[in-house]
Image: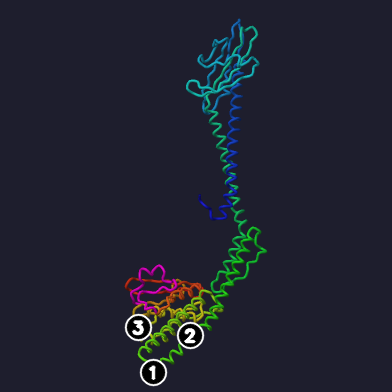
Amino acid sequence: MVRIQSLTARLLVALVAPLVVSAVLIGIGDAWITQRVVDYTSDRLLAGSVRAIAESVTLKNDHVEVDLPPWAFGLLDSPQRDSVFYNVRQSGRVLTGYDDLPDFDADAIGANGEPVFRTLVYQARRVRQSAVAIRIPGAPGPVVISVAQTLESRAAVRKTLMATVGAIEAGLVGLVALLIWPAATWSLSPLDGLRRRLAERSDARDPDFAPVAVGDVPRELRPVVVAFNSLLGQLERSVDGVRRFTADASHQIRTPLAIVKTHLAVLARGKRSAADQASLADALEAVDRLQRLIEQLLALARAEAMESDGHQAADLAACARSLVDRWTPRAAAEGARLSLQVEIAPAMAPLAAPLVDQMLENLVDNALRYGGRGIVIGVRQADGRSVLWVSDDGPGLPANLKPRPFERFTRGPQSSGHGSGLGLSIVKALAMRAGGDAFLDDVAGSGLTVSVIFPPDTA
C-alpha cells in the first residue's frame, strides 16, 4: 500500500475521493434514469405509431381495410434510420405488413385499447415491439396492430445523454478539486508558518531553545508543539550539561595532569638507572598523549555543543599566515615543509580566530602524522564562498577509511598510536558550527586535500 507523505495530498484525497465516489454513484443512478426516460419516450412514440395505424383501420363491405397514413412511421424517424416492421392481423390472418413478424397473444393484449410492449429478436436484430387490439363494430373479431422498431436510435440517444451527463459530472468534480486545492493549502498554512518559525531557529551558530508559543498554533497542532517544547527543554539541558562538563573538565583534568607531568619531569632530571630513565620517558610520553587526547575531546565537545562565540569573524588568510609562522619549525624538525597559497584576502569566516586556529592546527597535525613531506595551506574563493584547505603529498586515504574519514577515533595506517583520531572530527564539527562543511579530495598516491567551505554570506 502506497503511503501518501504530503499532508496537502492526503487532505485532497480525503476530500476528493468521497466526491468521486458520489459522482460515480450519481452516474450509475443517472444511467438508470436515462435508460428509463429513453425507453419511456421511445415507447410513447412507438405507441403513437401503432395508434395512428389503428385509426386508419375501417370496415367496408364487411371487410377490414387499412389505409396507412404517411406520417404513421414518421414518428419513428431518426438520424440512425431504424428499421421499422409492422403488420395488421385479424383472427390470426395478416391483412397487411410483415407476415413473419411475431404476433402478440390476443388475451395478453386485451381489448381496452392500451398498447403493450416487449423486446425480442427479429431477423437477427433486437427490436422493440408494441401492439394494440381494437374492435370494429360489425367485424367478426378484434384487429391487432403491431409495430416493431430496431434499437439503434435508443442506444444513440442514451449514449449522447450519458456522455453529456458524464462530462458535466467530471467537470464539476474537476472544478471542485481545483477549488479544494487552495482551500487545503490555506488550511495547512499554519503548518508552513510553524515551519518558518522553526527554520529561523536552525542557525547552528546561535541555537534558540526557547519554547514555541502555543497560543497562536491551531488546536490540532498544540500536542505536537507541546511535545516539541519538551524535547527542546531536554536538548537545552543536555547542551548545558556538556558545556558544564567541558568547563569543569578543563580545570579538573588539566591540573592533575600538569602536576603529574611536572613531577615526572623532575624525577627524570635525577640520576636514574637506564631502565628507570626509560620508564620515566615512557610515562612522560603517555601523559603527553593523554593530555592531547583530553584536549581534543574537550575541543570536540565544545564544537558539537555549539557554544556561542558572539558571532565573531576571523580572516582565514591571516590565520593561515600565522599558523605557517608558528608551525614551520616543528614541520622542519620532522623533515616537512609548509607553504602558503592565498588567492584572496581578507577571506572572512563566521568563526572566532582561536577556533579557526584550532581547525588549522588539527589539519596540519593530521598532515604531518599521516601525509607526505610537502604540506600546502591555502585560502581561495569558490562560488562566492571562502574555502580553507590543507593539502599534502602523502599516500592518500586508505580504501577502508574513505567511507568514514570524519568519524571519531579514525586513524590512518601510518599512525603510531600517538594520534587521537579526533582531528578531522573536530574540523567537521567546527565547520558545521560555522554553517559550512568539510570535504575530502583524495587521489590514490597523490596525497589528500581537506577543504573547509564556509557560507557565502560570511565571505
Q: Is residue 377 visible?
A: no
Q: Earlier in the sequence, mark 2 or mark 3?
A: 2
Horizontal arrangement in the rendering, residue 137 relative to residue 454 (left or right): right
Horizontal arrangement in the rendering, residue 289 relative to residue 76 (left or right): left
Q: What mark, if any, has residue 271 been given in the picture?
A: 1
The one of 138 and 209 positioned closer to us in this rendering: 209
Label 3 packing within 10 angstroms: few (<14), some (14-19), many (20+): some
| Tag 1 secondary structure | loop
Which kind of residue does numbered mark 1 sit on? Lys
Q: Give the residues drawn in magenta, as a range.
A: 392-417
- Label 2 or label 1, whichever lies nearer to me, is 1
Q: Is residue 399 magenta?
A: yes
The one of 424 and 29 positioned closer to us in this rendering: 424
Q: Is residue 175 magenta?
A: no
Q: Which residue was labeled with disc 2?
A: 257
| Tag 3 secondary structure | loop
Q: CA distance from mark 2 to mark 1?
A: 24 Å
Identify the residue at the far left of this view: 445
Q: CA distance from mark 2 to mark 3?
A: 30 Å
Q: Which residue was labeled with disc 3?
A: 336
* Residue 229, x across and y down, in percent: 62, 66
Q: CA distance from mark 3 to mark 1?
A: 35 Å
282 relative to 304, above or below? below
* Residue 337, x across and y down, in percent: 35, 83
336 relative to 151, above or below? below
Figure label count = 3
